[in-house]
Amino acid sequence: MLYVFYLQNTEGLIVTGMTSQIHDGLYLANLVFLVGVAAGAVTIVFPAYVYHHEGMHKVTVLGEMLAITAVIMVMMFVFAHMGRPDRLWHMIPPMGIYSFSSMLGWDVMVLNGYLILNARLRLLLPVVQVHRQPDQQEVVHAAGVCRDRLGAVDPHRDGLPDGEQPGAPDVVPQHDADPLHRHRLRGRPGADHHAFLIIRKNTKFWIDDSAIKLLTTIVTWCLGIAIFLTLSEVVVELYARTEHANGLYYLMFGLHGLTALVPWFWSAMVLMIGVLRAVLMPSFRNDMKAADPCAMAFAGIWIEKGMGLIVPGFIPSPIGEVTEYYPTFVEWLMVLGIWAFGFFILTILLKGAIGILLGDIKFGGPAGRAAK
Amino acid sequence: LTQQQRNGRGCNCPWPHRHSARPQYGAATEWAEHFQKNYRLMTDEEKAEARTRLERRYSSEYGKKVTVDTTGAQPGVLMGYALNIRKCIGCRRCVHACVEENNQSRGTRPGEKIEWIQVLRMERGEFSKGQDEPRLSRRPGHPGRRQRLHPGRPGARRASTTTTPEAVPEKGRHLHADRLHAVREAALRQGLPGAHHLPRGDGPVVIDYNWCIGCKHVHERLPLLGAALQPDHAGAAQGRHEPGDALPGQPAAHARRGREVPLVPAAHPPGPLPGLRRGLPGRCPQVRQPARPGKRSEQGLARKNVFRLKAELNTFPKFFYFYD
């Protein structure tokens, strides 16, 4: 990852597959998806603190660690996407000039704010628990709910799919009417579900069946609604088949024999519909060892809300250009590196959080007494 | 597509950097350039200092005397371009004249060649007599829709679109000159996270290269390729649009020819651009200052049938099409 980052900043972004037509590629696709994953903490926090779900209440901290990790990964993808990351300080006042009218400017503010809130609240909560101050815990929980609702509002993530950018006016519009925050949030319960199963299997921390079943239910509902809305938009767009549907048509079937994104779209559809079919079966849904469907859902949503959302927005261009986008080896290496680093951070955070939740780490414990 | 076609560099190497566009000269960027103030906040003394620094750097890098200009916008001038769409045959001579006039980069490697006028090559649609619907209606794409195809990497793009045609007009194709359109300054401002764009009083909105962070949001605000990725010697992918956008920190590729490198966009004196007038076979374009009252260009725009391309996307170009 460091090597390809060095390449990008010495050779230029010519080493990526991005062009003047397709200037948002694999990095932005991951960014958009991960912002949804981060904001999707609401799918855990709400059942826990609004509906007082006992099983979910115990594992909220674990889900929040995933949010912190996702935001850090988002910022790493921002760095990877920038042509001149060494000049980012130009938009930080008072050294630079901040533009409040810029969508990217608000993006930076929201992401940094969300990371600070997450770090403050969710890294604070274990400390409060260590000190055993239940009153303060409730305050932190309430603030966490508000934070998750605020964090779900990301102007860039929500603005680009709206087609408000003149450079991408015919972006796939299937996401406009989606009540679930462009239904990228649904990638989150899948990730949580998978993480919880791994934690339950490999650590002493026991996660209730009720929490996992609730997550599976959320995945089922979100997937069902999302697939329904997607198919609705397909019908709406392709019924009249105007030129404004060319972006979706290119994504689904290709245009003029250029079909770079077609395998992406259909693989996402197969994964998502396959997962929905699986989780609709009660025997499968209640199987506490079945982690594969959630991994499949995560991959399917990563494709659909990443490559399937960003790239077709620029194809064809407003003057009718059909430009193919192929991520280069450099881009794949960078993406793999950032994801690997994200899992590394998540592992560290989860180990610390589980230690505190299990009571293995206590204020004034053996280590503390040794220090004194 | 083969790997060779994908990387557009004539080899099967999976590592594109091996054959990338990295220029073979040293990037002698001085530290002062990194900490240069935003151009709109620079005092006259700081501009003079930057000018001296750039002249020193470029002259050193290319072994020839390079001068940098700081001339600003001229009052009462609004640069524009009016194209008679019925006479344009896509001969690209206006492109070459524009490159010559504005001292644009003439490199051959990706990112080095910069042309502000582009010629679109569009396939003609097919229609059959006696059919209620065009024959292409059930095929991908809109009936009769003229589209340019870019299969893969930029190398393939250049080969399929903006290369110099062997003969014009091309049979079965329609060639059509187009300009890098811009939007209003306010619309551009919405896309850029920093204040690194600089609206000029004579038309162009230019980018302060020393403050460009390479976010590429300028592309999203310019719908008609108003900006092009430009991997320069420092590894940046930076926005570029509008004529004469020589900027503070002008890419060194521009200075390679040893010509004058303006620190701010070159403001042409009133009157037709000599390069364009020399280069054109007919009177297809009229390059004027349309805001100058009483001039022929303004009268022409007022009297002729004039339209602008993709106005629904909030374009506000100084490039107008008209027909007699």
Image (tube, coloured by chain):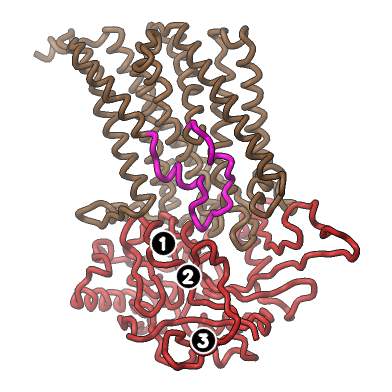
Chain colours: A brown, B red
Image coordinates of residue B81 in percent, x first then y, are 52, 81
The residue to which callout 1 is attached is: B187
Q: Nearer the viewer, residue B155 or A66?
A: A66
The residue to which callout 3 is attached is: B287
Magenta span includes A177: yes
Asked if both marks, 1 and 3, belong to the same chain, the answer given is yes
Q: Quadrant of residue A54?
A: top left
Q: Residue at x 21, y 18 (%)?
A: A127
Image coordinates of residue B236 in percent, x first then y, are 42, 59
- Specify the label residue A285 is tagged with: none
* Element under disc 1: helix
B159 shown above or below A241: below
Badge 1 density bin: few <14, some 14–19, many ≥20, Cα 10 Å: many
A261 shown above or below A367: below
Disc on the earlier residue, 1 or 3: 1
Nearest to viewer (mark 1 / mark 3): 1
Asked if both marks, 2 and 3, belong to the same chain, the answer given is yes
Q: Quadrant of residue B281?
A: bottom right
The residue to which callout 2 is attached is: B316
